[in-house]
Image (cartoon, rainbow, N blue to C red):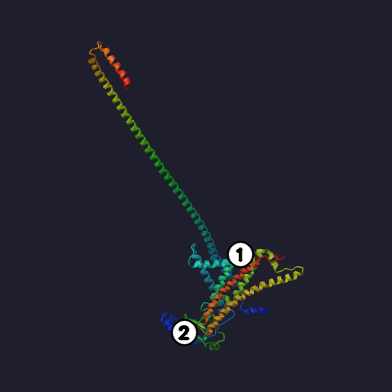
Amino acid sequence: MGQLGQILQQLGINGTLLLSQIVNFFIVMFILRMLLYKPVLGMLEKRKERIAQSMKDVERASAAAGEAEQEKAGILDGARREAQEIRAQAARDTEKIAQEIRSRADAEATAIRMKGQADAEAQVQTILTDAKKQIADLAIAATEQLLGRELQNRAEQERFVNEYLAQQSGSGK
Amino acid sequence: MNRIQNLVQRIQNYLRQPRNAITISVVVILFVAGFLIKTPPPHISLVAEPLLEGGSSWLTNSMLTTILVDIVILILALWTRATIKMIPSGFSHVVEIMLEALYNLTQSVAGKRARDFFPWAATIFILVLVSNYSGLIPGVGSILVVQEAGGHAAVMESSAKPRILGGELVMANGAIISMSGVRSEAQQEEGHVASVPLFRAPSADLNMSLALGLSTMLMAQVWGVRQLGLKYFKKFFQFKRSGMGVIMGMAGLLELISEFTKIISFTFRLFGNIFAGEVLLLVMAFLFAFILPMPFYALELFVGFIQSLVFMMLAVVFFTVATLSHSGDHH
């Protein structure tokens, strides 16, 4: 045992120094644990979490952006379709209005023509009546002259002429 | 002939640049000075020596350096703690990268137990690394403290009497000077005069490496008991009445012995590497003061790193092995 002690002494191993080195090691470990390991590992952990969170956020944001893009496309598509519809409707409406105007103009023209026809007819009728009257007068005068006699009864005379005229107009057509 | 002329031309062109010329001339001057300056024989001691003769024996040069190493580690830790930010940058980021690498290394061996083992592994690594590198700082091992017979020590100064010192490098008012040939006279005049290096790398002191080895192996037993309960000790005492029993008993005995062997191998691996490295550097400086030690310096930087890594990795491996259920799985 004494020999071992001597060897240890020759190697410089000394109880006090050994113990102080062990204590030193534990103190350093304690201090580093408080000052270095806990904050650094905690920070590494926190940073890892933060990065994971950021990645998730980015993913979510990009998904939302895609969705918005899709929505935008949908809205645009709808708008385009609507515009087309409105245009088609407008075209249809125009066509209808034009048709209406045309038909109304047609009707008006027809009415005007009809009226003109009727007027003309009435005029013809008047003229004809006049002419008949004159003809009758002339005929009477001519007959008077021709017959050389005057009917005694004026009223009877007129009745006779009218009868004759009615007969004429009836076969005149 | 033409080729030689070409070479001369190229060398001349190279030297025409002032920077190259200065570098080359400094190297040449140092090389010549290496022959002219007689380096004193290095002070080599296996043990850490007390700084105060007759005073307290615990204040050895390695203990003083241990305290300085602790202070350096503390400052680095505080600095990191103060500058640590969510967005990594600067010094704290470097420390973070280092610690993360250590953590991943621990995890690759210990798996789920990495969280428990990490403070041990990291502390061993940092403490051993800084201790190893403390021995490489110029002045450690070469600045000597003079012990006078009167019992008090004094750092050699230019005003102090030259009789005190032997042929060692001495720091005098900021300049390292060499004093040779005085020692023998001094020793003849006064028997008690001796000089001791002011600093000594803690890992070049057996007390430190033994302390680490003891703590590590003791802690391995603690982890084992914590994980497996009293069953842990079964692996040392496997006595059974059968043919295999004898072999298993022997194996258990070997296991028991190996726990102590591990302490010794831990201790002397670290101590041997670092102490040998310092002796190597001193001897190289003694053989040829300039340029020659440079490659060995690089080598010692590498060795210092590797030894701290090895110590840490072995500690983690021993911890992990201790927590694994040993006996019972075989049968």
**Residue B71: x and y, percent?**
52, 71
Circle 1 residues within 10 Å: few <14, some 14–19, many ≥20: few
Look at the numbered discs 2 and 1 and tell me whether their residues touch, using CB distance below 8 Å. no
Quadrant of image for the C terminus of chain A? top left
Residue B129 is left or right of residue A113, and the answer is right
Q: Seen from this angle, which residue lies furthest front?
A: A146
Kindly identify which numbered label has been placed on residue B111.
Answer: 1
Instruction: Tell me the subunit letter for badge 1.
Output: B
* Relative height, residue A35 to residue B261 (above, below): above
Which residue is depicted at the point 56% across and 81% down? Answer: B280
Q: CA distance from mark 2 to mark 1?
A: 55 Å
Q: Seen from this angle, which residue lies furthest top?
A: A152
Residue B13 in sight: yes
**Residue B272: x and y, percent?**
60, 78
Residue A9 is left or right of residue A40, and the answer is right
Decide which of B74, A111 is in the foreground and name it.
Answer: A111
| Residue, disc 2 | B28
Q: Are marks 2 and 1 on the same chain?
A: yes
Residue B243 is left or right of residue B293, and the answer is right
Q: Amino acid at mark 1?
A: Gly
Q: What number of labels is visible?
A: 2
Q: Amino acid at mark 2?
A: Val
**Residue A16: x and y, percent?**
61, 74
Instruction: Tell me the subunit letter for badge 2.
Output: B
Q: Secondary structure at mark 2?
A: helix
**Residue B57: x and y, percent?**
58, 77
Kindly identify which numbered label has been placed on residue B268.
Answer: none
Decide which of B38, B193 is in the foreground and name it.
Answer: B38
* Relative height, residue A153 to residue B16 (above, below): above
* Relative height, residue B261 to residue B89 (above, below): below
Residue B165 in sight: no
Which of the 4 quarters of the picture holds residue A148?
top left
